[in-house]
Image: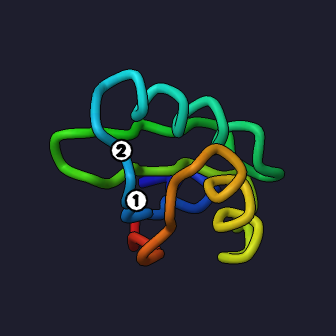
Amino acid sequence: MLRRKGVKIKVVIDGMCCDKCAKRAENTLTAVHGVVSADVKFSKGYGILRCTEEPSEDEIKVALDGVGFTLTSVEKIEQ
């Protein structure tokens, strides 16, 4: 079986109050170097990032801080 290259990361985000916030977080996270896509769920309070290379926690934190959200944890997901 072939494995897809890349990294999958779960990010827990504080400060979202609606689905529009989740969409803003998604747009912000996809602009981070290495992130191909972001799927953020307001109802769950976290997002899943699919990346070609792993961004640093600081890069993610700075991006989210810039739009008013707080990164509370980052967890690499084994694929």
Residue at figure coordinates x 58%, y 62% from the top left = 7
- Label pair 1/2, CB-CB below 8 angstroms: yes
Q: Residues within 10 Å of mark 1 (few under 14, many from 20)?
A: many
Looking at the image, residue 25 sits to the left or right of residue 13; the answer is right
Q: Secondary structure at mark 2?
A: loop
Look at label 2 and name its amino acid: Met
Q: Is residue 75 visible?
A: no
Q: Is residue 19 above or below residue 6?
A: above
Residue at figure coordinates x 62%, y 30% from the top left = 27
Residue carrying label 1 = 13
Give the label on residue 66, or none: none
- The residue furthest right is 33
Residue at figure coordinates x 76%, y 66% from the top left = 59
Look at label 1 and name its amino acid: Ile
Q: Is residue 66 visible?
A: yes
How far apart marks 1 and 2 lie (CA) works out to 7 Å
Residue carrying label 2 = 16
Q: Secondary structure at mark 1?
A: strand
Looking at the image, residue 61 sits to the left or right of residue 48; the answer is right
Closest to the observer, 53 or 63: 63
Q: Residues within 10 Å of mark 2 (few under 14, many from 20)?
A: many
